[in-house]
Amino acid sequence: MRYKNKNINIPNALSVLRVILIIPFVYYFINNEIIKAGIVLVLSGLSDMLDGIIARKFNQFTELGQMFDPLADKLTQGAVAICLAVEQPILIPLLAIFVLKEAIMVIAACFLIKKHKKPGGSKWYGKVATILFYVSFAIIVALKGIWNYEDIRITVVLLSVTAAFMIYAFYKYSKIYWAILRSDDTKYTMDINEVMDKKSSRK
């Protein structure tokens, strides 16, 4: 019987899709095709919701998926933040919060992996922050792309609310990070070979 790599599943494929969708999003955005950029981002957001639903329904959770799913979110949000900053330089300080928070979390996760510890998976507050990010951008895109309306005050308010929730999520994730780092519990121990699922079974 041929061995099946458990990491090859629909939720992980959707996470990979989100990373790939960054390319057309950036292309459409920088070429001022705002509606198309918005559609791509909506597809990315839907894939983010679906991968969690499918993973729970069909029990397709993997340690690799739990690490790659938030990474895909971070890369997408970083791309959106950079595009918005280029479009409206006045937002650079505010959008820097997004990039800084995601960068720190990626570095922290890598450090845990180096210590053979499992980074914590996505939590509800992280998902809510992600949804707020997508909704805020969707409103900004709809106002500009559909109704040709731009108001920097609306943009600042939307992104400020999102930034506030991201800071809260960062605080909560930081507590989990320190708890895992200091814990000797074997449930936080990670086997790299098992995560990558490289072992093969005999027929």
Image: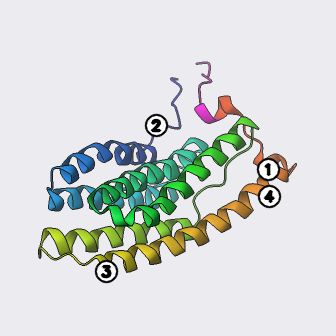
- Image position, residue 99 (x, y; %): 49, 55
Above or below 46: residue 65: above
Q: Residue type at mark 1?
A: Leu
Question: Residues under labels 4 and 2: Cα distance?
Answer: 30 Å
Judge by depth and name the residue closer to the eye, 2 or 186.
Answer: 186
**Magenta span: helix, strand or loop, mainly?**
loop
Secondary structure at badge 2 equals loop
Q: CA distance from mark 1 to mark 2?
A: 29 Å
Residue behind mark 3: 154
- Looking at the rendered image, the disc whose residue lies closer to the viewer, 4 or 3, is 3
Q: Position of residue 185 (x, y in %)?
A: 85, 50
According to the image, label 2 marks what residue? 8
Q: Nearer the observer, disc 2 or disc 3?
A: 3
Left or right of 180 on screen, residue 59: left
- Between marks 4 and 3, how big is the CA–CA gap? 38 Å
Q: State the SS at label 4.
A: helix
Highlighted range, magenta: 195-203
Reading the image, the residue beneath label 1 is 181
Figure quadrant of the C terminus: top right
Residue at the image point whose x is 51% and y is 30% from the top = 4
At label 4, counting other C-alpha atoms closer than 10 Å, the crowd grade (few under 14, some 14-19, many 20 or more) is few
Tell me the residue that label 4 is attached to.
Answer: 179
45 left or right of 12 in image: left
| Residue that protrudes farthest toward the front in the picture | 90
